[in-house]
Image (spheres, helix red, strand yellow):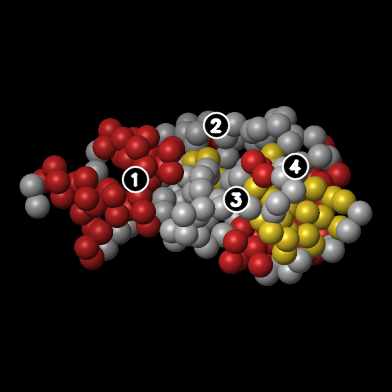
Amino acid sequence: MNKNSEHGKIRPPVNYPSPLTSAASSTLRGLLAAAVAEGYHKIGQAVFKPDAEGFFLCHAEDVGREDLEIFHNPHDAAALAINDDAGNYRPLKTGPNLKHGWLLRVASLADLHLALDLLYPAALANWRSFLRNEKIASPLRDTVNRQTGMYRVTGLITDEEAQGIVDSLCSPGCLRRIQWPIPSDAEPPLIPTKEKEIPLLCVDACSLLIAEARRVVKARLGK
């Protein structure tokens, strides 16, 4: 097993500009400042850009619209992330269903940081750890083997069943990019990077995946 395949290690990023990798040793706000300076203006389904009043954020598909509802408090980002366009609750903040129709104006980098963290919790922190090549992401096999109680049965899931869940549940239903492999002895997956976009990284199997793994195993066992 080579160095980069040790548990918890991520393959180091090779295509980020040096100001970003240098800023990763700073604070989260320092990293955000460097990202903005380097032209990183997108995260998930949201875009954020500096303007004369500070910064503005909106849904990426709403750029240029003139009929958006205006908000000015960074804390409003929390409410904007709760429901989708139809008013349905969003159990995953990283689901591909961020509501449209709003524009959030904030006065400072600190306010921008807060708003982004409310829209996509821990995204900046996970990205900084990725840039530092230090984020620990447990293989799915290790995660399910740690389950207890009603979820203990998930330890019986096969790698093929797990991949099926990733393909049917995770890939279409979440914008995060999975960092964890399925088998315990597998190398971490390569994390593709998009041009000028802060990535949303999945560092552990979520409760929705674990619940689906339980359902799949119980169906196979006839329980």
Q: Residue furthest front?
A: 67
- Disc 4 residue type? Gly
Spatial CA distance of label 2 from label 3 is: 31 Å
- x, y (%) of residue 52? 91, 54
Say which mark, if any, is on residue 190: 2
Q: Residue furthest right?
A: 52
* SS at circle 1: helix
Q: Earlier in the sequence, mark 1 or mark 2?
A: 1
Q: Are marks 4 and 1 in contact (CB under 8 Å)?
A: no
Mark 1 or 3, which is nearer the eye? Answer: 3
Say which mark, if any, is on residue 64: 4
Q: Residue at x 30, y 59 (%)?
A: 147
* SS at circle 4: loop
* SS at circle 2: loop
- x, y (%) of residue 14? 70, 30
Q: Residues within 10 Å of mark 2 (few under 14, many from 20)?
A: some
Frontmost residue, 77 versus 38: 77
Q: Earlier in the sequence, mark 3 or mark 4?
A: 4
Above/below status of 198 relative to 74: above
Q: Residue at x 49, y 41 (%)?
A: 178
- Disc 3 residue type? His
Q: Earlier in the sequence, mark 4 or mark 1?
A: 4
Frontmost residue, 212 versus 18: 212
Q: Residue at x 76, y 66 (%)?
A: 72
Name the residue beneath numbered marker 1. Answer: 141
Q: Are marks 4 and 2 in contact (CB under 8 Å)?
A: no
Q: Residue at x 50, y 34 (%)?
A: 189
Name the residue beneath numbered marker 3. Answer: 100
